[in-house]
Image (spheres, rainbow, N blue to C red):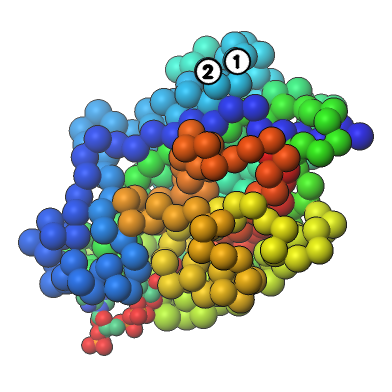
Amino acid sequence: MVRSAILGTGSYLPKKRVSNKELEEIVDTSDEWIKTRTGIEARHIISDGETNSVLAQKAAEMAIEMAGISPEDLDLVIAATLTPDMPMPSVACLVQDAIGAKNAGAFDLYATCSGFLYGLTVADGLIRADISKKILVIGSETLSRRVNWKDRTTCVLFGDGAGAVVLGASSENNRGIMSACLHSDGSLGGLLTIRGLGTRHDLKKTLENEWQYIEMNGREVFKHATRALEAVSIEAIEAAGWADASMIDLFIPHQANIRIIEHMRERLGISRERVFINIDKYGNTSAASIPIALDEANRKGRLFPGARVLMSAFGGGFTWASVAMRW
Ligand code: COA
């Protein structure tokens, strides 16, 4: 049976780091409030010249190098993002050109913070159906351009960054993606939204109303995220044929809030040492959060052949997803 396995990982963060203390000078907040409510201590933010596709390119090059392949071996580039450089061309096409993936198709995938797991699931299906052989899946975001830096309820939460993996076929029975579960509930979309900058409202109206920025009902999102993440994680564990969460060697949750992660960990019964956390350093990097964490875990030696890995994410839309794999 052909499964798809991760052959290489990469990640890249913008150079500029903004601490909670620095945010105290911009909005009415405190290091103490941000740390205790979210677990975030700092985030990285793009500077002039850095764009979503530049971050994505750097992460992609690292993943390709680790996979030991040439960019020309790729037959598809999928970039999960909600903050592309521009509506057209896509981030995936910009990266395809920048890395010289001459034989690859390319498209962006829009599923907010769950985007990387949606991308991984699509890529897994294409590989198992023998339509593609090697796919670059990227999660890349520059949400610093979409938060209102006057709104303390959102600007402290998000950061920029990119992560990428190369996915390819594996004939080893105990390696690769074992299950993938995708969900959505569009009826709750208004609880976490960027109303403007699409085609519904004209630009003048958008700017007058400040609809170019993220708006969020934090408490409601928190409530739905905790419930959905627990359920989808259990679903993916069962679909993988694992007895329960105690079989997981490393849990890589979307890094949105340490309290959401802690809640999930307790409900699923996973010990602290088996949860990968880096929200303190980067904040919520949306679609980039899981591939960045995966790359860090990989480079730190936290993943060993055969390790059972569970990844779960939740985001605007709402969308949520979970992927279980053997490393
Ligand atoms: N600094 C200081 N005070 C702040 C603040 C900040 N950055 N942001 C909000 N506050 C204040 C609020 O104004 C409120 O004050 P009030 O009681 O005087 O009205 C108080 O803190 C509590 O606000 P509340 O929104 O109830 O806090 P909370 O405990 O729910 O934490 C979030 C807020 C956003 C951290 C939390 O709801 C959350 O993480 N939600 C999920 C968000 C998420 O994950 N989104 C992305 C999904 S991918």
Q: Which mark is residue 68?
A: 1
Q: Quadrant of the N terminus?
A: top right
Q: Quadrant of ligand 1?
A: bottom left
Q: Nearer the viewer, residue 184 or 55?
A: 55
Mark 1 belongs to which amino acid? Answer: Gly
**Image side of residue 203 versus residue 318, left or right:** left
Q: Residue placed farthest to the left in the image? A: 25
Residue at image position (48%, 33%) is 299
Residue indicated by mark 2: 65
- Which residue lies at the image location 20% right of the left edge and 50% below the top edge? 18
Query: Residue 151: horizontal and vertical position, in percent?
Result: 23, 68
Helix, strand or loop at mark 2: helix
Q: Nearer the viewer, residue 136 or 324?
A: 324
Residue that extends furthest to the right in the rendered view of this protein = 1
Describe residue 232's horizontal placement relative to residue 41 as left or right: right
Horizontally, is 111 left or right of 27 in the view?
right
Amino acid type of the residue that numbered disc 2 sits on in the rendered structure? Glu
Q: Residues within 10 Å of mark 1 (few under 14, many from 20)?
A: few
In this orientation, does residue 254 appear? Answer: no
Disc assigned to residue 131: none
Q: Quadrant location of residue 208?
A: bottom left
Position of residue 265 relative to residue 52, above or below, is below
Q: Position of residue 176 (x, y in %)?
A: 75, 38
The residue that appears at 41% across and 26% down in the rendered structure is 58
- Please tell me whether mark 1 sits on a helix, a strand or a loop: loop
Q: Is residue 168 visible?
A: yes
On the picture, is 1 further left or further right than 293?
right
Labels 2 & 1 near each other (Cβ < 8 A): yes
For marks 2 and 1, give the CA distance. Answer: 5 Å
